[in-house]
Amino acid sequence: MGVSSDRLREDAARLLPGGVSSPIRASVRPCPFFVDRALGARIWTTDGAELVDWVMGYGPNLLGHANDRVRLAVVEQVERGWLYGAPTRTEVELAGKISTYYGPGKVRFVNSGGEAAMTAVRLARGATRRRLLVKFDGCYHGASDVLLSRRGDGALGIPSSAGVPEEFAGSTIVLRYNDVDELHRIMKKFGDQVAAVIVEPVGANMGVVPASSDFLSAAKEEAEGSGALLIFDEVVTGFRLGLRGAQGLYGIKPDLTVLGKIIGGGFPVGALVGRSELMDLLAPLGPVYNAGTFNGHPVSMAAGLATLRILEEGWPYFRAERAAKAVSEELSRMRLNGGEVAVNVIGSMFQVFMRKPPVVDADSARGSDSSAYMKFHEALMRKGVFSPPSQMETWFASSAHGDEEVSRTIEEIRKAWPS
Ligand code: PLP
């Protein structure tokens, strides 16, 4: 407090590209706000506005902001120092929990979901001694060179960012999400060169788009049949769709799982998990390199462990999913140009698409009216409801979203809906 947000915005624009440290934050309308503090399901801005938060740090805050038990675990850790460059008991305990639900096997902690995905791909290439990677249009796996590619005209991808060498995208095949036929066809042709098939088992970066069971089974079958590894990117879904994430829900086990977000309790983290014989290919035991000054950071480990202990009690899922159900049902009742809109919901994540259903892949998600969505987002913001600032993002409920937050949100949705 004390500095007006106009002044902060000017300074931020001068000092940070786009006034932000990660691009999606610049999309908030009418303009990005600055946060003073947050508690539970609410954020207070430097201008004194109170917002009901459905963005939740883009996923990690399943227990809401500043959960007391997580806060105490963090404080307790900080009082004992916060970076040692040596292993800790908390790190081993957290790895134990992750291995229980996503193993059996071993865990490598890194600093972000993107780093974990990049390392998983390197590990798969090292393990199989193959070059090609299969990924899916609309899935996001972080901002590393190896994973920034999109669909091209041919089978091989093209860079989705300036600065990514064509060779990187040219080693990646980008297929349509939920398209079993295309997956079979391409794997028949290239399968023996494919190191890994990487997929978000529930897409959370094209709005919310759950995979069909058939699609994930086909990915498993094709990877197994061709000697490639199946990588599930559960950075968003891990510990959100239940303790065992999407793989528990679908009953499909990948070779490697990429985690992030919730396992750090809101502090920076990423992890990969897999069978011991695969994970032991990582340095120091094996030839696949990965390292990091902050890997297994004690504060992230403490926050993550405290978070998972609370999630094991079960009630946070019940509360978060009840809130998601109430708000998504309200959105399903809305009409656009007289017709119904697509609302995809799974567990505590949902998104409304400004188009008729169904939305099953990136193309159908892109076919929604994003300017109507942004109008809705801006109207909600003006009423004190922080909704995701893009049609391609996800509403995240938390266990801190109670009846009051839900009914206030529903009331404002009715007023803000574009007519
Ligand atoms: N994978 C998925 C599915 C994600 O949604 C994200 C980020 O939103 C990432 C990976 C990258 O994680 P991070 O932002 O921690 O690098």
Image (cartoon, grey):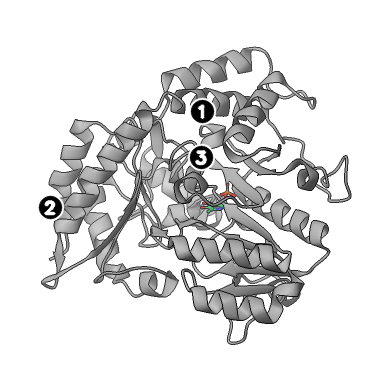
Q: Secondary structure at mark 3?
A: loop
Q: Give the mark nearer the N terminus: 1 vs 2.
A: 1
Above or below residue 254? Residue 125 is below
Q: Label for residue 414?
A: 2
Residue 272 location in percent, x, y?
Answer: 67, 44
Count of number-bearing discs = 3
Above or below residue 196? Residue 98 is above
Q: Label for residue 7?
A: none
Query: Which residue has dot 3 on it?
Result: 244
Q: Give the mark nearer the N terminus: 3 vs 1.
A: 3
Q: Label for residue 308?
A: 1
Q: Give the residue type at disc 2.
A: Arg
Residue closer to the observer: 58 or 156: 156
Residue closer to the observer: 182 or 260: 182
Write the residue at 80% across / 25% down. Answer: 86
Q: Give the residue type at disc 3.
A: Arg
Residue 299 location in percent, x, y?
Answer: 62, 25
